[in-house]
Image (cartoon, grey):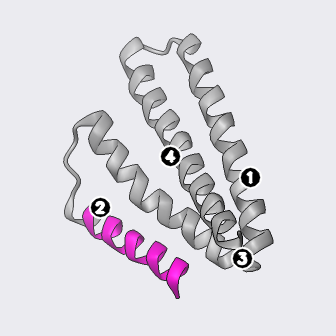
Amino acid sequence: MTLILKIVAMAAILLGEALSICAELIASRQFGKTGGDLTMLWPMFLLVCLGGILLVFGYALGYMHLKNIWIIVAISVGAILVVEPILTVLLFRDVPTAGSLIGLVLGAFGVLAAIFL
């Protein structure tokens, strides 16, 4: 049961980060296209709120069962390093630079090291 709760905590953190980053990227893309229409920011605000709720839930559940905040922080930072470049490529169709790819690979290794070491 503890392993399942750890996985749920990590999934909540990853999904919360993904939702928050997705909302930020979509809002920046749409805000640039519409010329500053503030009405389109409300759905993105709600999406960020949902992502924040998942992040708080993931952090709390993770700390209760992992007992080490540094593992949770490493998972969160690693999720940002992995999810943001992937979503940027999917939403903007922009090819990453060499530095971005290195950050992506190192972020993935950091997440794996934090989880398994």
Tell me which numbered mark, 3 or 4, is placed earlier along the sequence. 4
Q: Nearer the viewer, mark 1 or mark 3?
A: 3
Q: Is residue 103 magenta?
A: yes
Secondary structure of residue under mark 4: helix
Secondary structure of residue under mark 2: helix
Label 3, label 4: how many angstroms apart (C-alpha)?
22 Å
Main SS, magenta residues: helix
Mark 4 — residue?
18
Q: Residue at x 71, y 67 (%)?
A: 62
Q: Tell me which amino acid carries mark 2.
A: Ser
Residue 106 placed where, x, y %? 36, 74
Label 1, label 3: how many angstroms apart (C-alpha)?
15 Å
Q: Which labelled disc corresponds to residue 56?
A: 1
Q: Which labelled disc corresponds to residue 66?
A: 3
Q: Tell me which amino acid carries mark 4.
A: Ala
Where does the magenta region start and end? 101-117
Residue ranking furthest to the bottom: 117
Q: Nearer the viewer, mark 1 or mark 2?
A: 1
